[in-house]
Amino acid sequence: MSAISAVHTTLTAQEQAAQRGSLLLDRSEWGRLRLQGSPGLDYLHSQSTQDLKALKPGQGADTVFVTPTAGILDLATVYVEEEACWIWTSPQRRSLLMQSLGRMLPFVRGAQLADVTGQTFAFGLIGPQSQALLEKGVAAEGIPTKLYEHRQVEIQGIPVHLACGSGLAQPGFTLWGASEHKAALVDYLIQAGAELASPELWEALRLEAGRPAADRELTPDYNPLEAGLWHAISLSKGCYIGQEVLAKQVTYRRIRQTLWGIRLQGEAQPGTEILRQGEKIGLLTSAGLTSQGYLGLGYVRTKFNPAEGLEVEVGSAPGVLTRMPFSSFPPIV
């Protein structure tokens, strides 16, 4: 068996497990920032695209931090508590956001920001049996069931922060807590029936979901509308960084490019041009092998009328455009 075939077989087996059971993925490398103090939520509201002030304790939402010209810094998830917020960042963006948010924070009385990534662990529990597995160690009424809903629970006596949602387009949960409890939680979840996933699986799953990643689709070269992150944007809340640029793009329908999935018939490298009948129409930003074969993500210029099933070429690999489940596409034509 070739190396590629072996990888494909392993990914297929694990992704099938995610579809029928419960997979445990270590996400401890993702950034976890802790913003203490009730004024912190108002501050985050003004610094990112989501209507965070509408959230109540126990709720959460995705939001996008952007530059003044609406270029993407990061897609983050904010979980709101009574007097604090958790900010989940991409692994490559935690230092950047610490610096960016910390710049004006001294002027926000009563708010304190800390990077607690090194003192905590984090996991994704993905698959349709994840809730049933958790119910073996947590009372059913203690398990959050609405997307981004979260609460502090104990799993067989282990204190864990538990949130509904896998960060992908599959059912599941996100768990985090103090580092000293990591090993005990892993042992318990595996004994309860979870299958420990390989580190490479997240990349395959995020390609299949179409979730944009930092340094690939999430860069200042693109904005949240182009990335299809409509669910993380409020077009009606008050002023925030980058709002004017995004509002004009919606009002005047000037979204120049949109993120698409590409089903490829062979390997392709990020940075390769996407062609249609020999003409450049976009740029490949991610690509990899999944259980569905080779998949890519790329930005395609809207003036070329990208659509489901459009045939393209990426390097030497033929491909077709496909809509991806993670992204909501613009409600405009």
Image (cartoon, rainbow, N blue to C red):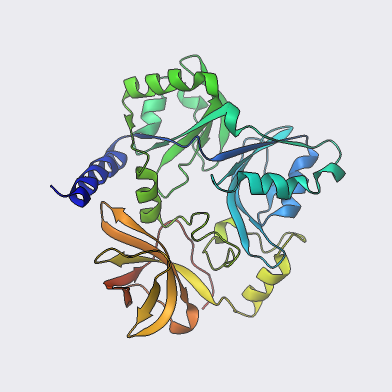
Q: Which of the two residues, 134 or 77, is positioned nearer the viewer here? A: 77
Task: Please determine whether, in this image, residue 278 is positioned above or below residue 307.
Answer: below
From the top left corner, tell me how far across and down residue 171 is, in percent: 40, 42
Q: Which of the two residues, 164 or 123, is positioned nearer the viewer here? A: 123
Confirm whether residue 161 shows in the render: no
Task: Please determine whether, in this image, residue 109 is positioned above or below residue 206.
Answer: above
From the top left corner, tell me how far across and down residue 331 is, in percent: 53, 70
Task: Name which quarter of the figure residue 48 lies in.
Answer: bottom right
Task: Please determine whether, in this image, residue 81 is positioned above or below residue 5.
Answer: above
Q: Is residue 255 left or right of residue 56?
A: left
From the top left corner, tell me how far across and down residue 4 is, in percent: 22, 51
Q: Which of the two residues, 34 or 225, is positioned nearer the viewer here? A: 34
Q: Residue at x 47, y 37 (%)?
A: 27
Outermost residue toward the left in this view: 1
Confirm whether residue 320 shows in the render: yes
Q: Is residue 239 left or right of residue 155?
A: right
User: How many tags in the picture?
Assistant: 0
Task: Please determine whether, in this image, residue 235 is positioned above or below residue 211.
Answer: below
